[in-house]
Each structure stands twice: as C-alpha cells, then as structure tokens.
C-alpha cells in the first residue's frame, strides 16, 4: 500500500501543508488505507470512502480544534481521525480499549461532540454557534448531515430555528443518493458562486439600502429574484426557510469543496452547502453494494466477501422468515422500519408484500405514531427497530400507543450488548423504559423457536406488546421446551431446590451453563425462563419462594428499572425470607468491544456469574 503523501500527516493541521497537486494522491492513499484496515477490523466502510475529499476540504478550510465539526451519526469520521493524528491506532478500530468508530471528545480535542444517533447535528451546531456568540468568540461551526439523516424530524426543527440566525453557521448536506441533471447542476454551481462572492453580496446590500423605505419596489425585486431562483436552483426549500443554499456541487472535487467552504464562512447567516458524493467510492464491491458495507464485517479485499461465513441462523433470519409467514396468513400484518430494512430482516417481506411494507426513513417517532394509526385502522403493525433507536420514540410509545392500548408490536432488535459500535448503540435500556409504561407487555425469547412463537402470539394480542432479542446467532438449545405462550406466564425448565436461576431472553443460554457449574459444585439448582418481563409471573414467584433459599435474576439490561428490581418488589411484597441476587448490566454506559469481551469485563459470563453465586452461598453458610 502506497502512503507517501499520507505519511506526511502526523497531527492536526498537517494536511494544510500538503500541496494542492498532492491532494488527489492523498485521497487515493486514504481510501487504500481504509480498505486495508477495515478488511481486518470491520467497520463503516462505504460511508467513509464517500467522504474523503469532503473531510480533507474541511480540514484545509478550517482551523481545528478551534473551529468545530459536528458529524451527524459520526460513522463517517474515519478520515477525520486520520487527519488528526490517529492513523496508527486504526489496527484497534472498534476493538475493546481501542479507537472508537465514532467521534469521542475524550479521544481528541478535534472531536467536538459525541455522536452515534441520527439527525442531531444541526441542533448541536446551532447550540455551539449561540454559545460562541455569547462568549464573543470567533470560530467557525460546521454541521455535516447526510440526506438520510435529514429525513429525521429533529433536523427540520433545527433548520427552522437556524433560519433566524444573523451570524455564520455552515451546514453541509452530504447527499449520496440523489441524481441531478448536468444542466441544472451546472447552473446551480454558477449561481452558488455568484451568490457567495463578496461583490455580489455587497451589491445586493447596497441596492436594498438605497431603496430603503420603498417597500413595494424591494418586494418586486425579491419576487423576480425568487422566481428566477425557483426555476434554476433546486434548493429553494432551504432558501424559503431563510437558509442560503449553495450547490449542488461535486463532493469529490476537493478544490471546489474547499473554495465553497471558505466562501460560506463569509456569510453572516445559516448556509447550506449541498454536496453530492458516492458511497463506497474507490472500492468496487462497496460502490455496488453500499448497504452491505455500511457496517462491514472483516472481508477479502479483492472481492469484498466476508471472511467469516455465518453457518448458524441469526435471530434476524428467524424474524425474517416468520414475518413472511405471518404476512401470508394474516392480511392485516404490516411491517414498518426506520431505514433499517436490511438490518432488521424485513427485506424479504418488502419484496413479497410491498403494499404492506413501510420504510419511513430515519424517523422513529413518526414510525411509532404511524403504527398507531395503522392499528386504529384495523391493521396489525409490526415495527422492527434496534433497541437503541427505539429510545428516540419514548413519548410516542406512551402517548400514541399505550395510552389508547393499541395493538402495535415492537420487534426490538439488537437488544443487550451489541459490541463494537459502543455506548450509543448498546441496547441495554429498553426493559427499563418500556416496563414503566401502563398497558405495555414485554417478552424475550430464550431461543429461535420461541421468537417465532412470540411473534405469532403478539400479532393476535390486543394491546401494545414488545419482543426483544439480541443481535447475531440464534440460540438453538433447549429444543424440547416449547410450552404454549400464555400472557405473563414463566416457563420452568429444570425444577429442583436451593437456588433458582430466573433468566430473561438471551441470558437463558448463559443460565444453562451457570447451572451446570453450580451442580458440579454440589448445589441443587432450578432454571426458569421468565418469558415475560411485564407482567412478571407473580404466581410462579410466590410458589418458588417455598423451596428456594436464593433467587437469582439474570438479564442483559441495566439494573435500574429492570426485570430484577420488579422481581425483588414482588418478593418483598410477599415477604420472601430468602436471598435475592441480581445479575444485570451496571447503571453506566458501556464502551465498544466484542460482546463476549464486554460480558467478561462486566463479569456477566457464565463462569463469573457462577463464581458470584457460589461465593454468596458459601458466605451465607459460614454466617
């Protein structure tokens, strides 16, 4: 891999010393570097290959860290990290203790905001602009937002607010999915250049000043100008909001990008630069299949094929198959996704039942209320969503679904520790926030067959119901335990005495191993699949108190507000005299790393759990 120009970049600002003639070679070397490194670690390849020139232009036109860049979502910040002295850490990208795949203020003073969720960059940037002006500072703030993220309602709320600015704020719309014809594009570039030159801006101001008081003349001038712009310029939506629109421009022309950013810095208002980029640029497999390389696993560089082929079905595969069967059996079944049809496993449903499939873009709040409308209209909507992203729709779940007790199914994917994306993506809060909602019911399957059974049950349930399941390989154990699902009823698997392991969802597989360790140490141990987190099976718990001295709850959720606390409340109310132990994720944000590594770090792997239980039992015996 050739890195002659790239090797000149040791720290922030070094890219400014690279000659203009060397920029194309630098862009090429950065792409080769990313393709090679991510083939080993995995990561967000397509988005980062698409923003190489844009990032270089930002770093050359701005003065970091004094100037601020806010990356929406943040998964496209790899070139930014390279240009700020973190190139040598890329072997550790997204690994435990290594370089984060997202901006991290604790990692570098050039990372101005920790991002991971979508559509917040304009709000953040606007706040930074206001703080800058209140403190009488004079730096530039740039928010970089993608066309996908711009579908989120929060982005439009921020644009509406930014329109009132009388101070500089730059918004870059990184558009990698829109096609604009050459003639309109060329005219747009020309008019953008004219509107941002100092001569034109000063001329416009002089004309308006000299016509001061002649309102009707000014309004006629504005009317003619806006009509011309409406005919030639595709960005009138933003202009009408009060935001100066520049573009669209070629997002892979670094020289032009740099020039536009420098010109935009001169305006005393909010400015949007519309940039056209190509996801996966420079790497054929990623250009052809950008979604496959959104969050890529390690791959073969020559063809992009993953290094590790999954031989066992994932929970997402089970969900996909079951959804197609449900769609065939029940014409009321509808599927909703917030721009995650591939990730959640809804692509097959989309192909078979396009009229009953709805991708609403990155707008989880709308998705939930849209589902509520479908439910009121007599349909059975299933909203498939990652646990971490469902957090964004907290109010809508309460107000629009639970308050009216509507039959909406929440298929909560990526529940629990998801690993390498880190704090912003760990799905460890859903049991806590959902179980606080009246009328909500929550299930968690122990294995792949139970996920199928729960989906069938949920579609016919008259009320809000959530099914939460983890990312990756579906547990295929306990095949002989498949009792019919009843609302709020747990499923005893092994019934003995002394110790009871009461496990939720993904933790059932761990509980099987914990039980084996305890039994090999001479302890009698029961194991029960909780099935329902809400309502919990109080009748079973009361009966369990009669023969178990220690009840251990196990969940892949934070302790606060989770399953364990609800069990303890029930046991306290029934005056349980034995001991209760909670195995849960501590109430803190969990860093990035392989989930198995994280479980060991948190002492939530089977051996650590068994050791904790044995230590507790032995201590009580001594007492």
Image (cartoon, rainbow, N blue to C red):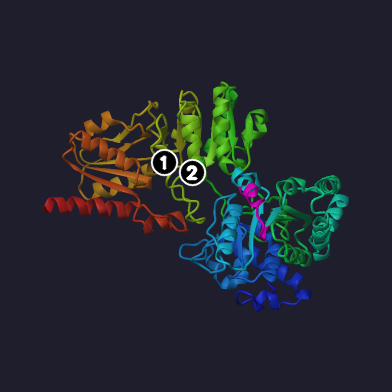
Q: Position of residue 490 (x, y in %)?
A: 33, 32
Q: Quadrant of residue 356?
A: top right
Residue at x 53%, y 36% (from the top left corner): 319
Judged left or right of residue 467, residue 206 is: right
Q: Quadrant of residue 495?
A: top left
- Callout 1 secondary element: helix
Residue at x 69%, y 71% (from the top left corner): 60
Q: Position of residue 225 (x, y in %)?
A: 84, 49
Give the crowd class for mark 2: few <14, some 14-19, many >=20 residues within 10 Å: some
On screen, 95 above or below 380?
Answer: below
Segment tinted magenta in the rendering: 158-170
Q: Position of residue 214 (x, y in %)?
A: 82, 49
Residue 578 on the magenta segment: no
Q: Quadrant of residue 602?
A: bottom left
Residue nearer the viewer, 293 or 574 = 574
Judged left or right of residue 465, residue 544 is: left
Q: Which mark is residue 391?
A: 2
- Tell me if residue 496 can be seen: no
Residue nearer the viewer, 141 or 164 = 164
- Tell me if residue 349 can be seen: yes
- For marks 2 and 1 on the same chain, the one whose residue lies earlier in the sequence: 2
Residue nearer the viewer, 236 or 208 = 208
Q: Position of residue 457 (x, y in %)?
A: 46, 26
Q: Are marks 2 and 1 in contact (CB under 8 Å)?
A: yes
- Residue under circle 1? 433
Judged left or right of residue 468, residue 162 is: right
Give the crowd class for mark 1: few <14, some 14-19, many >=20 residues within 10 Å: few
On screen, 604 above or below 484?
Answer: below
């Amino acid at each position: 891999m050739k890195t002659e120009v790239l090797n000149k970049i040791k720290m922030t600002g070094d890219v400014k010393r690279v000659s203009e003639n060397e920029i194309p070679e630098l862009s090429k070397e950065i792409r080769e570097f990313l393709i090679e490194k991510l083939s080993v670690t995995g990561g967000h390849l397509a988005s980062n290959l698409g923003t190489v020139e844009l990032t270089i232009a930002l770093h050359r036109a701005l003065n970091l860290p004094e100037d601020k860049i806010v990356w929406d979502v943040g998964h496209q910040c790899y070139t930014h990290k390279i240009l700020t002295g973190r190139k040598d850490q890329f072997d550790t990208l997204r690994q435990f203790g290594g370089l984060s795949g997202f901006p991290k203020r604790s990692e570098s003073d050039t990372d101005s905001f920790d991002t991971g969720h979508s559509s917040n960059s304009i709000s953040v940037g606007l706040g930074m602009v206001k703080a800058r002006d209140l403190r009488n500072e004079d730096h530039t703030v740039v928010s970089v937002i993608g066309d996908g993220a711009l579908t989120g309602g929060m982005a439009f709320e921020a644009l509406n607010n930014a329109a009132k600015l009388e101070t500089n704020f730059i918004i870059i719309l990184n558009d990698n999915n829109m096609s604009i014809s050459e003639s309109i594009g060329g005219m747009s570039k020309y008019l953008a250049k004219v509107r941002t030159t100092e001569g034109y801006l000063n001329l416009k101001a002089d004309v308006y000043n000299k016509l001061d008081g002649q309102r009707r003349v000014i309004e006629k001038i504005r009317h003619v100008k806006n009509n011309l712009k409406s005919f030639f310029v595709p960005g009138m939506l933003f202009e009408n909001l009060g935001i100066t629109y520049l573009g669209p421009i070629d997002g892979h022309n670094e020289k032009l990008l740099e020039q536009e950013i420098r010109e935009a810095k001169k305006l005393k208002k909010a400015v949007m630069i519309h940039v056209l980029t190509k996801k996966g640029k420079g790497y054929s497999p990623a250009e052809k299949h950008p979604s496959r390389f959104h969050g890529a696993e390690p791959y073969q560089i020559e063809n992009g094929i993953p290094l590790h082929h999954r031989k066992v079905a994932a929970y997402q595969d089970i969900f996909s198959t079951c959804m197609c069967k449900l769609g065939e059996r029940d014409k009321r079944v509808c599927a909703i996704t917030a721009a995650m049809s591939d990730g959640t496993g809804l692509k097959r449903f989309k192909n078979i039942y396009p009229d009953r499939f709805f991708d609403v873009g990155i707008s989880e709040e709308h998705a939930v209320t849209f589902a509520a409308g479908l439910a009121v209209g007599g349909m059975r909507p299933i909203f498939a969503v990652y646990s971490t992203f469902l957090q964004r729709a907290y109010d809508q779940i309460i107000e629009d679904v639970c308050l009216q007790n509507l039959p909406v199914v929440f298929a909560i994917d990526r529940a629990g520790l998801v690993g390498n994306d880190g704090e912003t993506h760990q799905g460890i809060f859903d049991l806590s926030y959902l179980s606080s909602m009246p009328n909500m019911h929550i299930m968690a399957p122990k294995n792949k067959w139970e996920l199928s059974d729960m989906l069938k049950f949920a579609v016919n349930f008259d009320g809000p119901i959530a099914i939460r399941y983890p990312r990756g390989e579906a547990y295929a154990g306990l095949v002989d335990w498949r009792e019919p699902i009843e609302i709020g009823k747990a499923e005893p698997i092994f019934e003995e005495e002394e110790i009871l392991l009461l496990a939720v969802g993904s933790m059932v597989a761990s509980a099987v191993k914990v039980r084996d360790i305890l039994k090999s140490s001479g302890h009698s141990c029961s194991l029960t699949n909780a099935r329902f987190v809400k309502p919990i099976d109080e009748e079973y718990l009361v009966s369990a108190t009669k023969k178990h001295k220690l009840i251990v709850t196990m969940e892949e959720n934070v302790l606060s507000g989770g399953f364990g606390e609800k069990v303890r409340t029930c046991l306290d109310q029934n005056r349980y005299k034995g001991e209760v132990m909670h195995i849960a994720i501590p109430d803190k944000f969990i860093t990035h790393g392989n989930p198995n590594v994280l479980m060991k770090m948190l002492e939530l792997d089977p051996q650590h759990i068994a050791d904790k239980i044995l230590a507790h039992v032995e201590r009580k015996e001594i007492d």
